[in-house]
Image: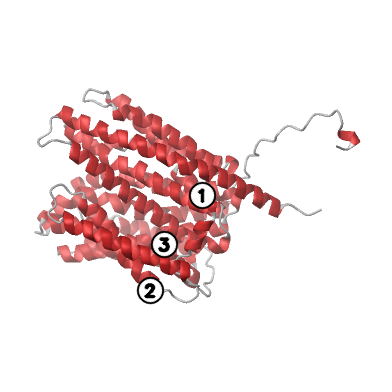
Amino acid sequence: MPPEQIGTKAPPVATPAAPAKLPAAIVMTAAIVAFGAFMSALTTTVFNAALEKISGDLHSSAEATHWTMTAYLLGYAAVIPLAGWLAKRFGAVRLWLTMLALFTIVSAVGAAANSIGLLITARGVLGMTGGLLVPAGQMLLAARARRDQLGRIMALMGVPIVLAPLLGPTLGGLLVDHFGWRSLFLINVPLCVVALIFAWFMLERTPGGPAGRFDSFGLALTAIGMPMLTYGIADVTIPGNPRAGFSAALIVVAVVLLGTFIRHSLRSKEPLLDLRLFANKAFSSACITSFSLGAVLYGSLALLPLYFLQARGETPLVAGLLVATQAIGALIATPISGSLCDRFGGGKVVISGLVLALLATIPLAVIGTTESYWWLGIVFVARGVATGLTVVPAMSTTYAVVRKDQIPHATPQLNLMQRLGGSLGIALLTVIYQNTLPDNPSPEAAADAMGGAQYWVIGLTVLALLPAFVLAKAERVSRAESAATDAPTQ
């Protein structure tokens, strides 16, 4: 120790400094991009309330009408792996503008559909545009933001992504009841046109460039495997489904195709998705955390309306409004989570959100038929806060631990993990709930079945904490290494 330091106290550990204010230009960019994410996420769930009226208007069977929901999910899943290559080849902004323009046109076609076949096709193409719109927006924001801005930037985009699934069923019910099912398409057109005008003048277009050899074999494997897996998981959980065996076989085939894709990608010099990113411990931890969050948060969300319908005898609209109170908590927490993430690291914020989710699930595990709606509203708001403290920090941390040139490969993989986790969580909890529920259940039996499923949610939340702790540690190491690299040499 140097003589001048003998007898002196060690300097106190500095607390993280408050991040600098975001530039207005990047805030405006994030707001425009967030609109596209909102429209894509809203279109996923807003259609739930329209199926019965569509079936009557277009004289289609219930099974055929249900394909309007499935087609969107399949189209979305099919194109996500393609997002990175297209963004590199044509530029993320051009890709985003093109997809929003197509989203507008196809929405108009869907509103004018006079047959169930055309409607299903329109929904499938909408899913494809949405599957490219969201990752394109994430990529252009991640490429422009500094590491200390990522949390707040992704929070701006994360607000609509978090809120849309919560608000979709309720908004869909209101639109269908007052304006008919075609309004679910028509509302997109003027909103998207205004967004396109703003985006055309506000977004700085960067040129595309060499994207490498197009991996057509990899695309074929994922374009078939991901929709097959998505459909199989959704279909196998339908009660009394005569296709359950066929759906299970589809899942097996999909797993084989995706396993082949993994093997091919690891051996290819220019794969469609660079799976070698998973060698980065921080990135792999972030993806696994996002997968776990999808299973916990969206799996539970799919069940909660059933409690109000079957145990409390409410209408679908009232059930949707009650569950949508989670949006209040999410709206409060998501912007705050961005600042916390930039200041303290996303891993720590995710852990706090999961702990809150765990505590807020306990009342639902012991739920009965007499709980005050005010009390349940408080529980749902707390769950919304937990959602806001987990989804965005996990997403922003992913971008904080990869290089700028790796973003086109990291973004599709993150989106795939989130979607796959959500699909599996919904399927698992739905099967558990349905198998516990007796035929012609009483309100008490429905409440007991819901409580039993929530115990599984508690277990899944505890499991989700494990990769979150690994993420926090890996992120701390990554930040330290980055700080050492960025530090000026003496």
The residue drawn where x is 29% and y is 54% is: 187
- Labels 3, 2: front one: 2
Q: Which residue is mark 3?
A: 196
Q: In which quadrant of the rendered view does residue 445 lie?
A: top left
Query: What type is the residue that disc 3 sits on?
Result: Leu
Q: Are dots 3 and 1 in contact, CB under 8 Å?
A: no
**Which numbered tag is attached to residue 271?**
none
Q: Residues within 10 Å of mark 2 (few under 14, many from 20)?
A: some
Q: Give yes or no for contact between labels 2 and 1 (Cβ–Cβ under 8 Å).
A: no
Residue 358, horizontal then vertical, whole percent? 39, 33
Q: Nearer the viewer, residue 417 or 101?
A: 417
Q: CA distance from mark 2 to mark 1?
A: 31 Å
From the top left corner, tell me how far across and down residue 277 is, in percent.
Answer: 51, 59
Q: Which residue is mark 2?
A: 217
Residue receiving disc 1 = 396
Where 257 sits versus 210, above or below? above
SS at circle 3: helix
Q: Point out the frontmost of discs 2 and 1.
A: 2
Which of the two discs, 2 and 1, labels the residue nearer the N terminus?
A: 2
Q: Position of residue 199 (x, y in %)?
A: 46, 61
Looking at the image, which is closer to me, 110 or 249?
A: 249
Q: For the residue labelled by badge 2, is the local secondary structure a helix, a strand or a loop?
A: helix
Question: Which residue corresponds to the image point at 52% horizontal and 44% vertical from the top-left?
Answer: 470
Q: For mark 1, give the secondary structure.
A: helix
Give the amino acid type for the residue marked by disc 2 in the picture: Phe
Q: CA distance from mark 3 to mark 1?
A: 26 Å
Q: Residue at x 17, y 36 (%)?
A: 437
Mark closer to the chain start, 3 or 1: 3
**In the image, which is nearer the foreground, mark 3 or mark 1?**
1
Say how many tags the image has. Answer: 3
Q: Disc 3 and disc 2: Cα gap in Å?
A: 34 Å
Tell me if 5 is positioned left or right of 225 in this view.
Answer: right
